[in-house]
Image (spheres, grey):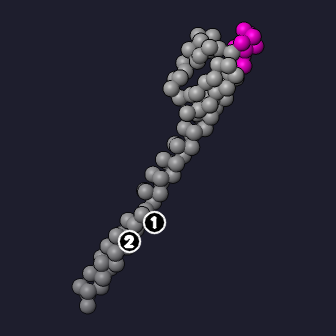
């Protein structure tokens, strides 16, 4: 009986350890998922702020020059911002900017 009791304890602990590795209850995986979701949310927020800043710069260009910039490169030289024009759709006739 003395050998069976420690064996049951080890078996029970092993069973609990294996059960805790399931996807739903794994704290490490939950933490990782939370961190990834937080990172993606922060990226979306940063992109939204960047679009708002570029739109503001377009309006400042218009106020200074009484026209919209012909392209985003002209806007970059005006305000010194480094823009990745591949990330935006820009209409120089209306000054409308949308994120791709």
> Vertical placement of 60 versus 97: above or below?
above
Which residue does the numbered mark 2 point to in the structure image? 19
Q: Where is residue 60 in the image (x, y as percent from the top left)?
A: 72, 16
Taking the spot 57% from the left edge, 28% from the top edge, the residue there is 88
Residue 85 is situated, as x and y percent measured from the top left of the image, at 53, 23
Asked whether residue 62 is drawn in magenta, I would say yes
Point out the tag, 1 or 2, that comes first from the N-terminus: 2
Asked whether, in this view, residue 6 is left or right of residue 95, the answer is left
Span shown in magenta: 59-67
* Residue 80 seen in the figure: no
Q: Where is residue 71 in the image (x, y as percent from the top left)?
A: 59, 16
| Closer to the camera in the image, 34 or 65 | 65
Outermost residue to the bottom: 1
Residue 8 higher or lower than 82, as above or below? below
Residue 34's spot in the image, x, y percent?
51, 52
Few, some or many C-alpha atoms within 10 Å of disc 1 (few <14, some 14-19, many ≥20)? few
Q: Name the residue under label 1.
A: 25
Residue 13 is left or right of residue 66, and the answer is left
Instruction: Report the residue that reaches farthest toward the front.
Output: 93
- In this rendering, position of residue 64 left or right of residue 33: right
Quadrant of the frame with the C terminus: top right
**In the figure, 9 relative to 96: above or below?**
below
Label 2 near label 1: C-beta < 8 Å? yes
Q: Residues within 10 Å of mark 2 (few under 14, many from 20)?
A: few
* Residue at image location 62% in from the left, 31% down from the top: 98
SS type, badge 2:
helix
Q: Residue 71: in sight, yes or no?
A: yes
The residue drawn where x is 30% and y is 82% is 8
Residue 52's mark?
none
């Amino acid at each position: 009986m003395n050998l069976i009791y420690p064996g049951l304890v080890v078996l029970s602990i092993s069973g609990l350890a294996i059960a805790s590795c399931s996807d739903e209850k794994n704290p490490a995986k939950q933490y990782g998922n939370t961190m990834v979701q937080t990172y993606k949310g922060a990226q979306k927020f940063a992109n939204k702020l960047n679009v708002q800043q570029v739109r503001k710069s377009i309006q400042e260009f218009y106020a200074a020059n009484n026209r919209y910039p012909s392209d985003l490169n002209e806007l970059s030289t005006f305000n010194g911002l480094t823009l990745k024009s591949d990330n935006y759709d820009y209409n120089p006739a209306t000054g409308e900017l949308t994120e791709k």
